[in-house]
Image: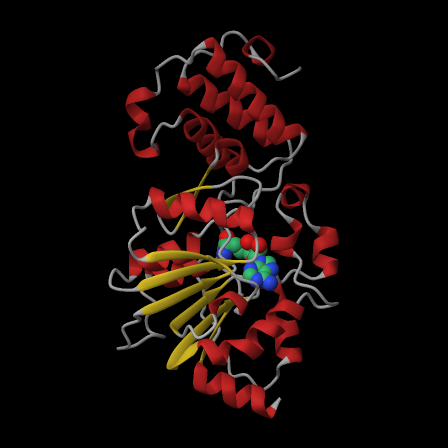
Amino acid sequence: MAIGSREGAAPELLTVRDWLRWTASQLARAELHFGHGTDSAWDEAVALVLGWLRVPEDRAEVLLDARLTRQEAAALAACVAQRIEERVPVPYLTGLARFAGLEFEVDSRVLIPRSPMAELLLAGLQPWLGERQPRMILDLATGCGCIGIAAAMAFPEAEVVLADIDAAALDVARRNVRRHGLEDRVRVVASDLFAGLTDETFDVILSNPPYVDPEDLANMPEEFRHEPMAALAGGGADGLELVQQLLQAAPGHLAADGLLLLEVGNSAPALLIREPRLPWLWPELEAGGFGVGIIDRGDLVAGLRQG
Ligand SMILES: C[S@@+](CC[C@H](N)C(=O)[O-])C[C@H]1O[C@@H](n2cnc3c(N)ncnc32)[C@H](O)[C@@H]1O
């Protein structure tokens, strides 16, 4: 059955409840990959239907029996078709993604937020930060700004810089800074790694840079191919060329007792081969994974010197 209009979907679909049920059934049958903020057809249907209709999930109950207009129904059916036939991730269809309990605007110019760093930020970077009160925080390779903006929320006294090489990503980051009313203490800077941050020093550097290696890139589910390649491919046979440059330059931009949090995901074993003497801490994440390394400036400098 063609799904591109309300009639095509089925004219009897009238209410939000009908659309949730139908969308969930369609998605469940389609053998999709769920890796962009949801892990089941049902959660994905909720994110798509309520997100596209701009109905807050915590108030959906009162609107379940509200009917969609014909135009809404046709447009939503078209989104379901795009999700299934083209494998477009839901956040690119709704323009919204959630990260660390916050809502972010996204489009295909930025990676869809999913870093496990959210969990660490929600814990106020404890116990790794200890008594230290970060005054200056950098989110390097910021994309839509999600990590830096979540850091600004976690540390209300801190000034935060969001840096990225890509002007299009920075447009999205700026929109998110405005959305969260953080213009007074969150700055958006165009920068190739630290090149645009000369003389700036930070108490905490957070980074989820591109780090995917060619093998993982070749085997990615179709959904990830809608994301910008420059946000995924880290360069080199192990995906860690850019990470290596970042590590070499980071000590020059970290305060004496500064902390670096670096996401390298599946490339963590390769990082241990490249830089065997760096004493990373790898927090166990409830969300799973072994992908975020934490290191003090002192350990970074000492480890790199020996390497
Ligand atoms: C994996 S995405 C992370 C986006 C965001 N931090 C997140 O977690 O959703 C990596 C980002 O790094 C940016 N990037 C790639 N090369 C860079 C470079 N040399 N300097 C700064 N940013 C870079 C890309 O434009 C992209 O936005």
The quadrant in which residue 249 appears is bottom right
- Say which of 94 and 251 sits in front: 251
Q: Seen in the image, is 152 located left or right of residue 244?
A: left
Number of marks drawn: 0
Picture coordinates of residue 89, whole percent (x, y): 57, 38
Picture coordinates of residue 67, whole percent (x, y): 39, 12
Q: Seen in the image, is 19 located left or right of residue 306?
A: left
The quadrant in which residue 98 appears is top left
- Is any part of residue 301 visible from this angle? yes
Q: Residue furthest bottom?
A: 306
Query: Residue, x 39% and y 78% (percent of image)?
Result: 258
Picture coordinates of residue 269, whole percent (x, y): 63, 72
- Say which of 85 and 133 sits in front: 133
> Relative to residue 130, is residue 65 depicted above or below?
above
Query: Residue, x 52% and y 46% (percent of image)?
Result: 112
Q: How is the image coloured?
A: secondary structure
Quarter that holds the N terminus? top right
Q: Seen in the image, is 242 located left or right of residue 175?
A: right
Quarter that holds the C terminus? bottom right
Query: Residue, x 37% and y 54% (percent of image)?
Result: 149
- Is any part of residue 111 visible from this angle? no
Taking the image in four quarters, ligand 1 sits in the one at bottom right
Picture coordinates of residue 57, whole percent (x, y): 35, 33
Query: Residue, x 37% and y 48% (percent of image)?
Result: 177
